[in-house]
């Protein structure tokens, strides 16, 4: 069959444009199958692999590491003739010959040997089931999220919606369900791997498939001894599919694209890092440990301008009994983000007290109606409504600083994140359109997301899109604290425990219920005067919620 060459272009990759090619995974002459990865792309947010939509032989490449591509950019040219040739089920049928039958002196030519189909081809040709690749579904803006648990194994029979894996980011844990029922053939991921939307999870054998490869047609012939026709030309499609890709002999460090990106950001040569993961896989912790050791050896050179001395390594057991307690996964994941936000954002924290005496009386008066609705009405929904009103009055607080640091992105929506205490640590689900909802609706949503956060049932979309965050320690205690801004937001509000205090009014001290407020804000965007005005407006609104109607 004549060569049929097809171009493969960059598919739809969302809003990403001019994204860098960091790795080319094939070369001319390689035989590839559909869904084999061709190149790895990397933006400032994630690394992603581009799969091939067709199978065949790579003819030529048009990209190299360092190039930048967008949707529609040409990647390579594939000879797809092998993909288009039907898979033979047996030797080609014998051709009738008009000449006399072969004699003993002239034995008939022997038919060539045809490679047996691969197990995959055989199953597709006549098996009662099809094999489907199950991939990570849409999980919001999360990329490179860690697999902390694999809930199935090869041979398991599963039902649709059964949980396959558990993922955990620095904000939440979530389970990925199966979209179909079937039998697990191969599991592609393991605990410690990092995945994104579209990453293969497993190969599922789904019952009910119809055979698609027709059997070889029967050829009727009355010739007593037909001579088998000679078979010439290129190798069959079966042979091409079975042929393994050629290797270049190089053994790269065993690490995922996201780990390679992380290493490049820190300037770490992966060849110098020992992997502690399965089969020597390099993990994020391996890179962090390498950096820590390097900093300890040469702190001034590793951190120019800072000159921090290395932290001393102390054997605490010399002073008494000790116990080593590992950090939770959320603590391990959130720690670097908190450190980054604290170091990279100039924090200012404004403290004030809000008089909520009337607000608390109003809340108590609504207790009966809340019970009829089956909800518990806490102070937090009222604070959320007051925050929404303050964000509308001071739009600079409902904004994000652009990556170039020169423009401010003002948001015309009001989504508020609320820190929820879980056994694994704090997570911050986001309540959408707070300005449009009643306190009863907010209370019901808070109860729902809090329960799902503690049972690790939050979805990726539950944790994205926040404009402003509230962290409440009122149920625990304290008078004030400094909450760390949840970038890319520019402010966060901390609530401490309310208490009765003597307040001087009209020539005398009167008891008033006061709520401590702690507002941290990004000083690059918000100056002290604006921060003080925001807190004052928030306090006035909490003192009299009727102001929301103005």
Image: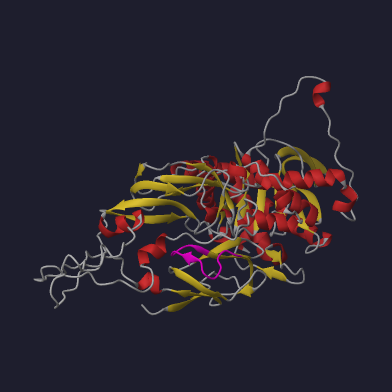
| Extreme-top residue of the structure | 320
Residue 41 appears in the picture as rendered: yes
Q: What segment is highlighted magenta in the picture?
A: 24-37
Relative image position of residue 26 (x, y in whole percent): 55, 66
Taking the image as shown, residue 310 lies to the left or right of residue 483, namely: right
Residue 102 placement: quadrant? bottom left
Q: Nearer the viewer, residue 498 or 9?
A: 9
Q: Nearer the viewer, residue 104 or 504?
A: 104
The N terminus lies in which quarter of the figure? bottom left
98 in the magenta segment: no
Taking the image as shown, residue 490 lies to the left or right of residue 186, namely: right
Residue 45 placement: quadrant? bottom right
Residue 537 appears in the picture as rendered: no
Count all numbered tags in the image, as a single digit: 0
| Rendering colour mode | secondary structure
The relative height of residue 17 versus residue 248 in the rendered view (above or below) is below
- The residue that appears at 47% across and 66% down in the rendered structure is 31
Relative image position of residue 527 (x, y in whole percent): 82, 62
Q: Nearer the viewer, residue 60 or 483?
A: 60
- The residue that appears at 23% across and 65% down in the rendered structure is 214
């Amino acid at each position: 069959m004549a060569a049929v060459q097809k171009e493969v272009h960059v598919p739809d990759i969302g809003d990403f444009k001019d994204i860098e090619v960091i790795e080319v995974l094939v070369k001319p002459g390689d035989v590839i199958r559909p869904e084999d990865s061709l190149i790895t792309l990397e933006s400032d947010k994630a690394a992603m692999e581009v799969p091939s939509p067709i199978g065949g032989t790579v003819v030529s490449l048009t990209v190299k590491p360092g190039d930048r591509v967008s949707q529609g950019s040409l990647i390579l040219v594939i000879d797809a003739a092998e993909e288009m040739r039907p898979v033979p089920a047996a030797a080609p049928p014998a051709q009738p010959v008009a000449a006399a039958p072969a004699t003993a002196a002239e034995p008939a030519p022997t038919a060539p040997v045809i490679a047996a189909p691969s197990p995959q081809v055989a199953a597709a040709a006549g098996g009662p089931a099809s094999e489907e690749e199950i991939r990570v579904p849409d999980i919001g803006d999360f990329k490179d999220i860690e697999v902390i648990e694999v809930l199935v194994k090869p041979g398991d029979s599963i039902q649709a919606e059964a949980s396959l894996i558990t993922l955990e980011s620095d904000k939440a844990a979530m389970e990925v369900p199966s979209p179909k029922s079937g039998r697990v053939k191969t599991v592609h991921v393991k605990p410690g791997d990092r995945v994104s939307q579209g990453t293969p999870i497993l190969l599922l054998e789904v019952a009910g498939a119809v055979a698609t490869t027709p059997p070889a047609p029967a050829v009727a012939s009355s010739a007593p001894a037909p001579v088998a026709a000679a078979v010439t030309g290129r190798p069959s499609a079966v042979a091409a599919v079975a042929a393994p890709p050629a290797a270049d002999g190089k053994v790269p460090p065993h690490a995922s694209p996201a780990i390679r990106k992380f290493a490049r950001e820190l300037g770490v040569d992966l060849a110098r890092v020992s992997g502690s993961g399965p089969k020597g896989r390099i993990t994020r912790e391996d890179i962090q440990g390498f950096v820590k050791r390097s900093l300890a050896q040469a702190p001034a050179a590793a951190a120019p301008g800072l000159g921090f001395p290395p932290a001393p390594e102390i054997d605490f057991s010399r002073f008494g009994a000790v116990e080593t307690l590992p950090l939770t996964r959320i603590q391990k994941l959130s720690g670097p983000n908190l450190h980054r936000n604290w170091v990279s954002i100039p924090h200012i924290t404004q403290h004030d007290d809000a008089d909520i005496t009337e607000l608390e009386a109003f809340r108590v008066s609504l207790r009966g109606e809340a019970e009829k609705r089956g909800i518990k009405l806490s102070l937090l929904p009222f604070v959320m409504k007051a925050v929404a009103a303050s964000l509308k009055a001071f739009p600079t607080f409902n904004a994000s600083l652009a990556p170039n640091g020169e423009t401010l992105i003002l948001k015309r929506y009001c989504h508020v994140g609320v820190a929820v205490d879980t056994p694994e640590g704090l997570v911050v689900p986001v309540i959408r359109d707070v300005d449009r909802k009643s306190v009863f609706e907010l209370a019901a949503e808070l109860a729902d997301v809090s329960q799902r956060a503690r049972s690790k049932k939050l979805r990726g979309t539950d944790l994205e899109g926040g404009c402003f965050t509230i962290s409440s320690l009122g149920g625990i205690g304290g008078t004030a604290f400094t909450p760390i801004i949840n970038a890319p937001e520019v402010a966060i509000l901390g609530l401490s425990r309310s208490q009765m205090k003597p307040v001087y009014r009209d020539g005398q001290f009167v008891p008033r219920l006061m709520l401590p407020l702690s507002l941290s804000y990004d000083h690059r965007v918000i100056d002290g005067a604006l921060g003080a005005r925001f807190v004052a407006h928030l306090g006035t609104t909490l003192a009299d919620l009727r102001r929301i109607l103005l």
